[in-house]
Image (cartoon, grey):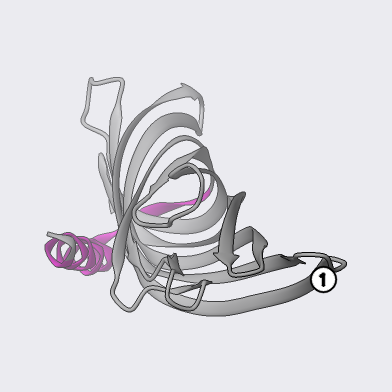
Amino acid sequence: MRKLGCTALFAACFAIVPSAFAGDFFINGQVGRMDLEGDNFDGDQSSLMQASVGYRWGIGYAQAGLEGGLGKLGELHDDTRYDYTGGYVDNSYTLNSRYAFVGLNARIKPPLVPVYAIGRAGYIGFKRELEATSVNNAIDTTPVTEHRAFEDNDGGTYVGVGVGTTIMPLLDVGLMVNQYRYSQVQYNPVNDEYELSDDKRDARSVSLTVEYRF
């Protein structure tokens, strides 16, 4: 379904561009929540903020074009304890995730209807920074604290659909549902560490959007 959505948007862009007489630049902002699958952190949701720019070509109620932007997920925290003979180790983790994306964007505004539909699909790249603090509490000894850091990059895909309405000339508000597929950070109990998953996993977000066209 994701491949079909990307192909349809790609074809729409190149079908419209040759005959386009006008277009719009746009600035878009989104805030919302993302559901993470298999992240292993306390709570399976994170906040989302992103901003993008783009341009759409088209005639009448149909437009298609390109978009690119940056985003950030809310900070995630987790704590674990590992028991061993003679003591235990308390681990505390903090994960920060940022991303950049580029893709295709299509907007359809039927005549005489006060709403429009949006479709988007493309490539997304994530940068994850994990900070870990371990406190080794051995019996009859002073606790030993160790700090570690993990940083990695990974790429994936995204596809989204949404609806909206125009509240002022060239100013729109709407609701978007996005699906992402990329390697997520997961806990490995064998080595007591967080690491990127070997397989791609899904994440979904629901967000409010504000877009200004010019």
Point out residue 111 in the picture as x, y percentages from the top left corner.
22, 27
Left or right: 12, with 39 as reference point: left
In the rendered image, the vertical position of residue 190 relative to residue 114, given as above or below: below
> Which stretch did the figure color magenta?
3-27
Left or right: 137, with 207 as reference point: right
Point out residue 102 in the picture as x, y percentages from the top left corner.
44, 68
Please tell me how many numbered marks the rendered image carries. 1
Q: Quadrant of the N terminus?
A: bottom left
In the rendered image, the vertical position of residue 45 relative to residue 157, given as above or below: above
Point out residue 33 in the picture as x, y percentages from the top left corner.
47, 39
Magenta stretch containing residue 104, yes or no? no
- Residue visible at 30% across and 25% down in the picture: 115
Mark 1 is surrounded, within 10 Å at the Cα level, by few (under 14), some (14 to 19) or many (20 or more) other residues, namely few
In the image, farthest residue toward the right: 142
Of residue 201 and residue 191, the one placed in the foreground of this image is: 191
Secondary structure mostly taken by the magenta-highlighted segment of the chain:
helix
Point out residue 124 in the picture as x, y percentages from the top left corner.
42, 68
Residue with the mark numbered 1: 144
Magenta stretch containing residue 12, yes or no? yes
Secondary structure of the residue carrying numbered label 1: strand
- Residue visible at 81% across and 69% down in the picture: 145
Type of residue at label 1? Answer: Val
- Residue visible at 43% across and 69% down in the picture: 189
Left or right: 59, with 146 as reference point: left
